[in-house]
Amino acid sequence: MIQKEFSSPNSLLKNVDLLPIFVFHGSSARRSYYYRVSKKVEDITYVRDLTLKYSGVLGCPGEFDQDIWIIMQSMIINKINEEGDCNALKFTVEEINKILEIKNAKEAHKKIKESITRLTDVNIEISLQRYDDKKGDKNFSVSNFNIFDMACFKDKYENKKYSESHVIYPSSWLINLFIHKDASIPNTAFYFSLRHVLTKRLYRYLLARFLKSKYFASSMKELANEIPLDKTYLESPNKLKGHLSELKEKHFLKDFSVYKESGHWYLKANYDEKFEEYYPPRTIGADLEKIDLIRDKYIALFEKSDLGPKAIRELLRYKSVSEILMYVEKVGRSKPSNPAGMLFAAVKNDWTLREIKKEKKEDMLEEKRKKNLKKMKEDKEKWAEQKREEDKMKKIYEGLSDKKKEGYKEKATKQIREENSELSEEVVKDFFLKEHFIRVKIHEMLKKDLCLTNGVNVSQ
């Protein structure tokens, strides 16, 4: 086993997701990474050195580049599945951004192209050494690899129209891995459902480890070198529990334990055999086809609403494409005010058309209740404002001299008579010349006079 592991670089390259290509902490200006593994069996010492070199001016790959790698990897696999090979992969920034959903198109083009450039600049160097202490023999070999041999970007503006045609050329060793299905292949839907960048990295790493065995055990020191993790995780290994818990909650891990033994920290984890029941294997290409199909149907029925790729991928966790399309049709018939919310509820709870209509009715009642509450609140505020205004006018009126008060009272009485001149004096006197109506009219006159005098006290 040891001889096989240290006699060829293929044993390490078969688990490409074990390689610590991406930096999740510290400076993105890291120029190289070095890690040595050595073992001794009887008189023979085996040594394997891994060196990652980053030659580009854009620095080493980081958090965002891990997402790009997963997308490009899935697109390569999709082409291999369709055509049997992938010497060159054509792509557009637009189709990648359907997964990432970067809102600013200009920013998306810049970030995605720079990311692919960083991945192309990565050089993997593996040196293998074998020392026979008894015979004095020494064998030494060095191998160099790249993820992508080359990336070409072509943007074209013609007749005020923009078009793009970009190509990457994956390295031959990478293509062979995917053709012979020797590498771990992350589930894209599951990967993009994970909340934290380190959880994503742990998923990729453990998935590669689970290729050999559904049980994983490692010292934290070894794990820190291979992820890689910064020293705070070595000092406080329990910080990893939150990331591992998410992997367990989402059925990737059956169980795990982080424990201390003889002064050293260790991690044990078991793969959940039911994982693929929750997340059936899918590639980006297949995902995009399904997403476009559902999205087009949704927009056709609900012109003023849209459903993003992330939301559709979440729906695909519960139902097949044909079932979701059926639910979109059912929800469309009920014409709800919140189609996306009702679609999610219908898919998750297996609603029938009758239940969808019932939910719509409940939604309408709830909406009516909210409108009534809003009107009541507005009326209350309006009444409060009127009361404040009335109190203000009353205070001003009370501050007037008796002569002024009498003058306003006479004017108010006169105006009320004029406004109701078509009525008899007896009716006006019995119904309109009441104290309340006279007071309201006086307040209106005071308010008008205040406006004319720009706030100068009318009692002056």
Image (cartoon, helix red, strand yellow):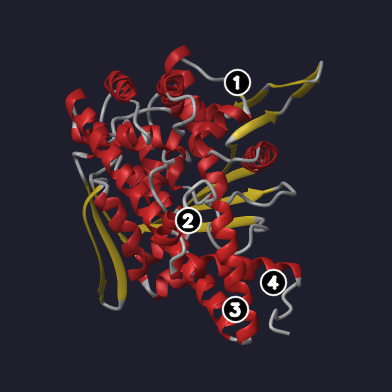
Tell me which corner region of the image, top left, top right, bottom left or bottom right, holds residue 240.
Answer: bottom left
Q: CA distance from mark 3 to mark 4?
A: 18 Å
Q: Residues within 10 Å of mark 2 (few under 14, many from 20)?
A: few
Mark 4 or mark 1: name the one nearer the start of the chain.
1
Q: CA distance from mark 2 to mark 3?
A: 21 Å
| Screen quadrant of the N terminus | top left
Mark 3 or mark 1: name the one nearer the start of the chain.
1
Q: CA distance from mark 3 to mark 1?
A: 97 Å
Q: Which mark is residue 425?
A: 2
Q: Which residue is mark 4?
A: 450
Q: Nearer the viewer, residue 90 or 292?
A: 292
Q: Nearer the viewer, residue 20 or 353?
A: 353
Residue at x 43%, y 66% (from the top left corner): 434
Does residue 4 appear to the left or right of 127 in the view shown? left
- Mark 3 is on which residue type? Glu
- Under tag 2, what secondary structure? helix
Q: Residues within 10 Å of mark 4 (few under 14, many from 20)?
A: some
Q: Which residue is mark 1?
A: 88
Against 198, is 385 above or below? Answer: below
**Badge 3 vs badge 4, beta-carbon distance below 8 Å:** no
Q: CA distance from mark 1 to mark 2?
A: 99 Å
